Image: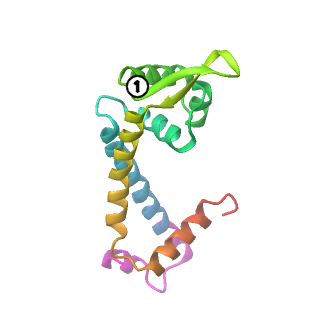
Amino acid sequence: MSTKFADRMSDDASRRDLELALGVELNALLSASRALTERSAAAFHPALQPAAFHLARWLYAYGPAKPSTLAEAVAMDRSSTSSLIGRMKDLKLLESTPDPDDKRAVIIALTPAGEAQVRKALDVRGTTFFERTAHWSTDDLHTFTALLHAFNSPQG
């Protein structure tokens, strides 16, 4: 624990002070996450905007989907999604095939090259993440993970 942080967390700190300190740390986490996402997106493909990485990462995690499903899943409007899909297809990162259930629709999937680029980008994220926790004990990792899980659960 850094000295500056420890100083703020003295035993006599009020709950409000602790909540404010938590807010500071969460803001730092979110800022670091945004910066890491930007670096990961650049590693995915430097000619694409970061939103393309969000599409590719979702497809990597969940598999092929209709463009409308993909747009909804990543909270992007359909026209932006369509434009990115077209650009990613031009770069041979995505491919489309007819939807077997609806011949008017298509299914979008990562190509092998697209999957390789997603793995490369995720390696950037993983390396950075693991560097930050490399010196932590397994007990600290367990505690941090459990607390984040509790914080992120809808019940709080």
Instruction: Tell me how the rendering is colored.
Output: rainbow
Amino acid type shown at disc 1:
Met
Q: Residue at x 42, y 39 (%)?
A: 115
What residue is shown at x 31% (from left), y 79% (from top)? 3
- State the SS at label 1: helix
Tell me the magenta residue range: 1-20
How many marks the image carries: the answer is 1
Q: Main secondary structure of the magenta part?
A: helix
Q: Is residue 129 left or right of residue 106?
A: left
65 over 122 or under it: above or below: above
* 125 over 88 or under it: above or below: below
In this view, the residue farthest toward the left is 46
Across and down, in percent, residue 116 comes to: 37, 41
Name, please, the residue furthest toward the top.
104
Residue 39 picture quarter: top left
**Residue 37 pos. (x, y %):** 38, 46
The residue to which callout 1 is attached is 88
- Find residue 143 and report its horizontal and vertical position in percent: 52, 76
Q: Residue 10 colored magenta?
A: yes
Please say if 4 is above or below 127.
below
Task: Name which residue lies at 56% across and 22% down.
Answer: 78
Classify mark 1: residues with Cα within 10 Å, few (<14), some (14-19) or many (20+).
many
Screen quadrant of the N terminus: bottom left
Q: Quadrant of residue 138?
A: bottom left
The C terminus sits in image quarter: bottom right
